[in-house]
Amino acid sequence: MILLPVALGWMLVRRLETPATLLAWGAGTFLFAQVLRLAYLQLVAVLFETGALPMPTAAYLAAFNIALLALTAGIFEEGARYLGYRKAIPNARSWNSAVTFGAGHGGIESILLGIAMLWQATTLPGGAETVPWFMPLLGAMERVFALCLHVTLAVVVLQAITRGNLWWLVAAVAAHAAANAIGVGVLAVYGPFAAEAALALIAAFALAVLFRLRERG
């Protein structure tokens, strides 16, 4: 979870001949998106607690939470990617640049989650004993699948700019939200192994889209 995105970023910069700053901008857009998203979610929580928004009934609360978290992830992360292209990296308009940018975005997420898991296992009392032996491996697999999705969505969002059609941005938001919702929903109902299988299928489809967009330029 920590070393893979570093190795991937290094490889992409060398083989695609793209600047390493694209990795940094990708990481920056992820962090920027999360700051705004967490602030928004806290605001929504306050509105529910104060009664300004009606609380969903118990029967629909879990589904509502999954939908809210998935949709906000799609909106804020893909929106941050779009703003990054527009404001921070206006010259990054190639497939190679978008792939590197997406690797930075998904890579920093993987690194942060890996650090959090390592911290839990090594510093919390009984941390290593409370985590099943296979969970770190599943976490690593999930990050591989997530990186495939992030790289693809970075290329999809770029189409909104190069083709002058914001429906590509809408498609990226919808795909991001759907992938998150499917992963969490399958995990809740069928468990972690089924969730990883579902994410593997999503990653395979994402890679097919990624290379199809490369063929079309």
Image (cartoon, rainbow, N blue to C red):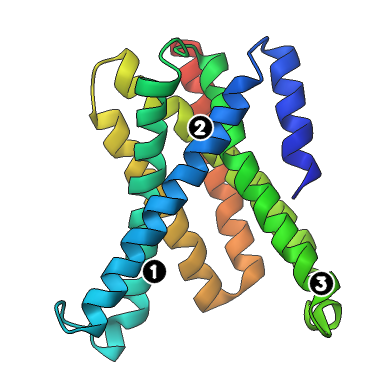
The residue singled out by tag 3 in the image is 121
Secondary structure of the residue carrying tag 1 is helix
Comparing 204 with 181, the one in front is: 181
Query: At 33% across and 47% down in the image, what residue appears?
Result: 75
| Amino acid marked by disc 1 | Ile
Q: Residue at x 77, y 66 (%)?
A: 119
- The picture quadrant where one finds residue 151 is top right
Distance between the Cα atoms at labels 3 and 1?
27 Å
Per the rendering, the mark at residue 4 is: none
Residue 200 % position (x, y): 61, 50
- 126 on left or right of 69: right
Dot 3 or dot 1: first in sequence order is 1
Residue 191's x, y, as percent?
60, 75
| Relative vertical location of residue 39 with respect to residue 124 in this rendering, above or below | above
Q: Secondary structure at mark 2?
A: helix
Q: Give the labeled residue for mark 2.
A: 152
Tell me: residue 190, above or below residue 195. below
Give coordinates of residue 162: x percent, y percent: 33, 13
Q: Which amino acid type is marked by label 2?
A: Thr
User: Which residue has dot 1 on it?
Assistant: 66
Mark 2 surroundings: few (<14), some (14-19) or many (≥20) residues within 10 A = many
The residue shown at (41%, 28%) is 84
Rendering coords of residue 199 (x, y %) = 57, 53
